[in-house]
């Protein structure tokens, strides 16, 4: 699939992509389909150059990575023990990484729909909703947003890592906040051997008809299995909801919060309070911001059946 990705990072730092569909079918048990809907409770853009380029607000895209827990235990330790980890960017081992389109801060709902009208056959653009009184800014994706896909080897031991990424036109961008969750927590049935069950049911139906005498056509069998799996996946392997980000990278520039802490301390206890407030501001990292509303689907990969 053009929106799926399977990369493995070697010990020398080389990234390798698997392109053989037959090999992929034998190696992986399924794919996770990720569709972003909305991101809320977003922080404000703190890069003045980027504000001039793309508008006053973070330019958000949703990133997701697969961590095979039985293979990359060090990555799980980082995710569980470091409250300031860098989400997808902190993963040191093999990881399947996908990302959504970016909701640029200078694109509003009107520009989003105008793009669709002017470009026949294209989807509307993701767009940014500025902050309002007591309401943080948010990013919204069109209802027909195309999902991206991530391959899974062992669904029972997979951790999904989600990161909100602030995309930049000038520079590399940065992680805003992240969270991680076991796939089985969102989709408890992914550990079941669905493919084998569906395959046996389809074969029984085919063997019970006229196909039994002439033999089973492998192509038809593959097609029937894929259709049956897709039907079950649509019914039992779907999840939609909110994921609150729980980790954020350490703040590089703390001048603003040091000044705020000093001012607050001075109001309470004068110069001594100012010093204490500034010290507190220097160490305080703040809470992770951002909530991702998204849709997930698990799609078991049917094995290749040959003559």
Image (spheres, rainbow, N blue to C red):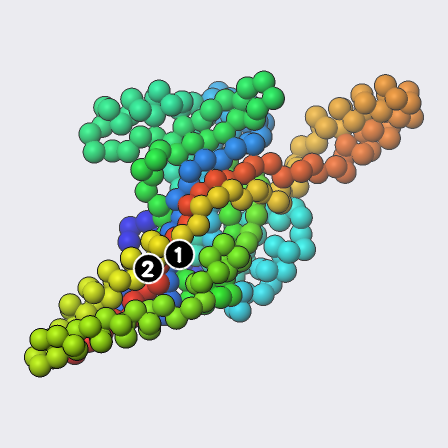
Which residue lies at the image location 43% right of the left edge and 63% below the top edge? 190
Residue 25 appears in the figure:
no
Can you say which quadrant of the picture contains the N terminus? bottom left
Q: Residue 232 has which mark?
A: 2
Q: Earlier in the sequence, mark 2 or mark 1?
A: 2
* Residue at mark 1: 237
Which residue lies at the image location 28% right of the left edge and 33% below the top edge? 123
Can you say which quadrant of the picture contains the C terminus? bottom left
Q: Is residue 22 above or below residue 283?
A: below
Question: Closest to the observer: 268 or 175?
Answer: 268
Q: Is residue 145 above or below residue 64?
A: above
Q: Local crowd at mark 2 within 10 Å, few (<14), some, or many (≥20)?
A: some
For label 1, the SS is loop
Report x, y in % for residue 146.
32, 42
Separation (CA) of disc 2 from disc 1 = 7 Å
Q: Local crowd at mark 1 within 10 Å, few (<14), some, or many (≥20)?
A: many
* Quadrant in the picture for residue 42: top right
Q: Judge left or right: residue 192 versus residue 41.
A: left
Question: Closest to the observer: 142 or 91?
Answer: 142
């Amino acid at each position: 699939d053009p929106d799926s990705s399977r990369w493995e990072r070697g010990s020398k730092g080389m990234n390798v992509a698997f392109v053989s569909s037959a090999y992929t079918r034998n190696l992986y048990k399924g794919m996770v389909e990720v569709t972003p809907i909305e991101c809320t409770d977003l922080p404000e853009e703190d890069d003045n150059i980027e504000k001039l380029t793309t508008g006053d607000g973070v330019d958000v895209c949703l990133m997701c990575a697969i961590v095979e827990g039985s293979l990359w235990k060090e990555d799980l330790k980082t995710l569980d023990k470091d409250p300031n980890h860098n989400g997808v960017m902190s993963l040191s081992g093999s990881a399947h990484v996908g990302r959504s389109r970016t909701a640029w801060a200078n694109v509003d709902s009107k520009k989003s729909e105008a793009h669709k009208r002017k470009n026949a056959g294209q989807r509307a653009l993701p767009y940014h909703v500025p902050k309002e009184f007591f309401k943080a800014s948010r990013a919204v994706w069109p209802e027909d947003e195309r999902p991206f896909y991530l391959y899974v080897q062992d669904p029972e031991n997979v951790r999904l890592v989600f990161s909100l990424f602030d995309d930049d036109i000038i520079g590399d961008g940065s992680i805003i906040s992240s969270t991680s969750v076991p796939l089985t927590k969102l989709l408890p049935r992914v550990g079941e051997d669905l493919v084998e069950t569906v395959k046996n049911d389809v074969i029984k139906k085919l063997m019970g008809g006229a196909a039994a005498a002439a033999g089973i056509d492998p192509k038809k069998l593959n097609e029937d299995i894929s259709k049956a799996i897709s039907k079950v996946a649509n019914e039992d392997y779907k999840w939609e909801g909110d994921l609150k980000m729980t980790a954020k990278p350490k703040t590089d520039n703390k001048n603003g919060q040091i000044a705020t802490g000093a001012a607050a301390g001075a109001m309470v206890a004068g110069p001594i309070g100012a010093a204490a407030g500034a010290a507190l501001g220097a160490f305080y990292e703040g809470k992770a911001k951002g909530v991702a509303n998204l849709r997930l689907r698990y799609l078991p990969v049917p094995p290749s059946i040959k003559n």
